[in-house]
Amino acid sequence: RDHATSKAAADAIAGSVEELRRRVLAELPGTAEEIAGRLGLRRDQVAPRLTELTKGSSPRARKTKTRRQNKESGLTAAVYAAIEGNGQ
């Protein structure tokens, strides 16, 4: 495995990942599926950004107790909300 290539790839997408986080944060509250639909993205592009936004020493989002049914799967999913005053 070429670590230099992996690092170069990670560096290349770092800016776009941060931009996706900002876009996802701006669409809260919602489930990953709802936010993906509003942004014209796939759920698998949004869900990791939601997880990232809830982690770290200064989380910018939180998982609420509310759950809503996903249209695609019929299963329920957590609704995420922004943490006011923390990057909002």
Image (cartoon, grey):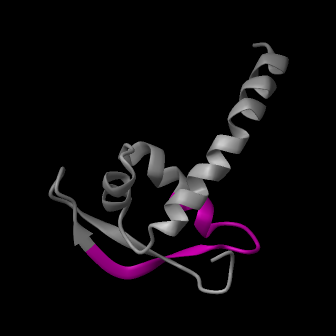
Q: Is residue 7 left or right of residue 82?
A: right
Extreme-bottom residue of the structure? 85
- Range shown magenta: 50-67
- The relative height of residue 20 versus residue 27 in the rendered view (above or below) is above
| Residue 60 inside the magenta-drawn segment | yes
Extreme-right residue of the structure? 4
Q: Position of residue 44 (x, y in %)?
A: 42, 44
Q: What residue sits 75% from the left and 13% below the top? A: 1
Residue 38 falls in image quadrant:
bottom left
Q: Is residue 70 left or right of residue 42?
A: left
Q: Position of residue 33 (x, y in %)?
A: 32, 56
Extreme-top residue of the structure? 1
Task: Indicate the quadrant containing the C terminus: top left, top right, bottom left or bottom right.
Answer: bottom right
Q: Is residue 32 left or right of residue 5?
A: left
- The relative height of residue 63 versus residue 51 in the rendered view (above or below) is below
Q: What residue sits 85% from the left and 19% below the top? A: 4
Q: Is residue 4 left or right of residue 85?
A: right
Count of residue discs: 0
Q: Position of residue 49 (x, y in %)?
A: 55, 54
Q: What residue sits 53% from the left and 58% below the top? A: 23
From the viewer's side, name the closer residue of 10 and 85: 85
From the viewer's side, name the closer residue of 68 and 35: 35
| Residue 57 inside the magenta-drawn segment | yes
Q: Position of residue 19 (x, y in %)?
A: 62, 51
- The relative height of residue 7 versus residue 40 in the rendered view (above or below) is above
